[in-house]
Every structure is written in structure tokens, then in C-alpha cells.
Amino acid sequence: MADDQSGCAGLGARDAARPGILRVHENDHVAVALGDLVAGETVTTGGVSVTLTTDVPKGHKIALYDIPACQAVLKFGFVIGRATQAIAAGEHIHSHNLATALSGVEDYSYEPVPVAQPLVPSGQFLGYRRSDGKVGIRNEIWILCTVGCVARTSERLARVASERFKGRIDGVHALTHPLGCSQLGDDLDHTRKLIAALAMHPNAGGVLIVGLGCENNQLSALLKEVERPEDRLKYFAAQMVEDETETGLEALEALVAVVEKDVREPCELSDLAIGVKCGGSDGFSGLTANPLVGKVADRVAFAGGQAIMTEIPEIFGAERILMGRAKNEAVFDGVVSVVNDFKQYFLDHNQPVFENPSPGNKAGGITTLEEKSLGAVQKGGTSPLNEVLRYGERAHEKGLSLLEAPGNDAVSSTALTAAGAVIVLFTTGRGTPLGFPAPTLKIASNSALAQKKPHWIDFDAGQVLNDGLDVTTDSLMDLILRTASGQPSCNEKNDEREIAIWKNGVTL
């Protein structure tokens, strides 16, 4: 492995005469096509020239040298798999000639890597300071349900309340799910813990919890896990009241009367908690959007704020990078545990640990899970890893945290929000309209996507290739602070707010 663990953290502004490929690390065996290339073209990167022997789609890999069969192939300075056959210089590298080298559970040793302390960045936004010291960037009322049986009741209450209380607060939103009934053991505990964490989120000035009455996820047990001032938390079981709509609206009226008095005040970057997530990655995600978000994560973490990353199956093959940055051996042990537990989770269900990338990832140029992971971990920047969280837990440490959750967009982004992220930075090479309870900034890895879907995409990270990481980071940081101060994200404009809970047990 190469010493430089920062991927393309050193990528500067792109020369106007730059050829159509990019080699990320000086030790890499491959380069990435910056556009669709055809056989016979000669292209150059970092002083290495190669003539294409095959057509290569945009975002896909090209061999810079002859690679023997079975040899490890490097990208980002790390192994992304092994050649399944001899590969000639100039040849397209993808699933037909490259395969993962991952297998199952591994042994790890604690080998800490020094982390440079940069200048502490600054930045202000206007947020809502809550009684527990947390800072929210929205002043909404959230309606949560204990069980899917009252999901429609919750949604009806949100529709009526949104119209009745329009203009008095930032909004009333029902965050519903189909679970809560016929669940047992850890599966039920996960659901309860996740909902309780959402009920304490600082973007919600007030919370109404709607129960049914006969569900496994009993309202009384849930409330024991929720810490929130009494005047900002209301609840009822629909079976126990005569008119659930009337009861709900009365509760919402009482919450609005309290929440509407909250005002924004100046807050520092150290007050901000961000979640970082990627979905529908392509061959540019690890070159532009993910390292860009990593720069932002470093600014927030080193300023004393919180940066939370997740998607444990999408760090397989790159986990040692995070392990090396663990602040102590206890945090290292936490990473080992959460990684190997997740691998065992796959193996227990007779699935390989490398059942990834997705079809969309492969179409965009990502071949193996190692390649996807090495691009994905760049969202965590280079700061020390200070905390490992299990699913449904809330972040407490300042700096970078690693959260247990699957790669699924909705499940992992919900978990990030429950952990305390008040804004989610969501990188994508394929695009999605999906949004979550916290403002979700969609960051396109390529300019073509940003131009095609401006109603989905909040920021074009394709600018990195022309303007460099530092300049583009300044632009993204400005958007984040404006969003934190009240500017709506695309998902908010489109009323795209969803939650999804990790169902991992039996159903009665």
C-alpha cells in the first residue's frame, strides 16, 4: 500500500489543456477516463502516455502499464482487486478482467497513523440553540409514530397542521414507517432506539409521538428513552382517545405556541453536526464529490463540530485507513468490531461480503467493492476518528464519528439524522430525488448530472476538475452555511422527506 492515504486530496485545478484521463496517485496502475475515449487515441497523465487498445467509457479505468494475470491493481494508491487475466497497457479495465480480493472476517492490528492538525477554520450560521446545548438549523415540528398502523393518521395530522399553522414555524412533517408491530428482541430495540433518537433531534423544536395502543413498540417504553422538555413533547395512543385527529391537533397547537417563539442566533462552525453519505456512485465520485465532502468534514471536525460517516459495508477494503486514524485503541477496537460484525452479518445470511457495487455503480465505472470503498471513505476526510456508534445511537464526541448502518440510502441517511446530523451531505454520480428529515444537499460528482437534474442537485462537484479542491470546498462550505441559516435545499423544495428503519429480525 502507498503511504498517501488521502486519495486525490492533492488534486489541484485542472489545466485547460489537460488530456482526457486522470491518474489519482503516482503509484496507480490505472487512470480514469474524463470523457468517452476511443481505441487508437493517445492520452497522457502525470507524464505517462498510453495508446488505447479499446474504447473506454467516461468514468471507467484504463491500464497505464501491462498488468500480468493475478497481479494486484492499484488505484488511489491502494489495491482495488486482482487482474483475472493479463491486461495490456491502454486496455479498458472493468468487471471482465478485474475482481475483488476480499473474502470474509479479518484480523487487524492497531497501527496509528499521525494526523496533521491544520489551521482551525471558521464560519458562522444562524441556528436554533436548544436546551441540551445542541444547535438545530430548522425549527420544525415532527410527528413520529410508534407503529405503521397510525402512519396515515400521522400524515393526515401533518397535512392539516401544515395549513393551519403555516408561517408560524418552519413546518410540520410526519416521519412515518411500516414497523413497530410483530417485532421482537434486538429488532424491536433498534426500532425503538431509532425513533427515540429522532424525537430528540435539534431540528425539531417540538415533537408529537402518535401510538396505537396494542403494538409491540409500546409508547410507554419509547418515552423512557426520550429526553426532551415537557412543553416540547406531546404524545397519545389512538386507541385511548375518542377522536385522534382532534387530540392530535390540540397537541400540535400547544407545541406551535412554544416553538414559534424560538429565534435564530449566530452560531459557530463548532456548533454544526453534519452527516456524510454517498449514493449511486460513479467513476468520478472518488475523484470529485467524496474528497470534496472530506475537505468539508475536516473543516467541521477540526473546528470542533461533528462529522458523522456511515455505510459500513462500503468501507470494506478501506477500513484500515479509518483504523489507523482511531484516536486510541478503544476506538480502534470499536471499528474492528463494527466491521467484522457486519461481515459476519452477511456470512450468516449466506451472502458474500463483496456483494457490491450496484449495477448503477458498475455502469458508472466502479468495478470492485475495494474501489468503491476507497472512494467512499474519502468523505471522512483526514481527521482523527474519535467515536464509533452503534445503530440508533447519538453522537456525543466532537470531531469524526463512524456510525453502524448499512449502505442503503434511506436507512443510512435516517441513521445519520438520528445520530444528530442537522444536515446531510449526499454525494451522487447517478442522482436521486430522495430526501430525509434533515436538509439533504445532493452533491453531483459530475457536471453532466448537475446540469441534467438541477431540481435534484444542490451542488456541482465536477468543478473540482477545473477549479481544484480548495476553491470548490470554499464554494460548498458557503452553500452549507447558507442552508444552515435557512436557505432550503432541493429536497425541502420538493417536499422529499423520508425515514427508513433497519429491519434485521424475525416478524411474528
Image (spheres, helix red, strand yellow):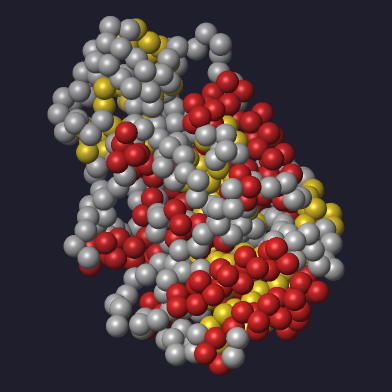
In the image, is residue 282 above or below residue 228? Answer: above
Residue drawn at x 49%, y 26% is 448
Which x, y percent locates residue 244?
Answer: 59, 83
On screen, residue 440 above or below 412: above
Residue closest to the eye, 460 or 20: 460
Work out whether residue 338 or residue 350 is closer to the camera in this orientation and state it: 350
Which residue sits at x=57%, y=38%? 455
Q: Is residue 126 visible?
A: yes
Q: Is residue 229 visible?
A: no
Above or below, 271 relative to 15: below
Quarter of the image for residue 349 reads bottom left
Q: Which residue is at 52% across, 34% downward?
A: 453
Q: In which quarter of the image is the C terminus?
A: bottom left
Q: Where is residue 426 in the image (x, y as percent from the top left)?
A: 53, 46
Relative to 424, residue 454 above or below: above
Left or right placement of residue 364 versus residue 157 in this view: left
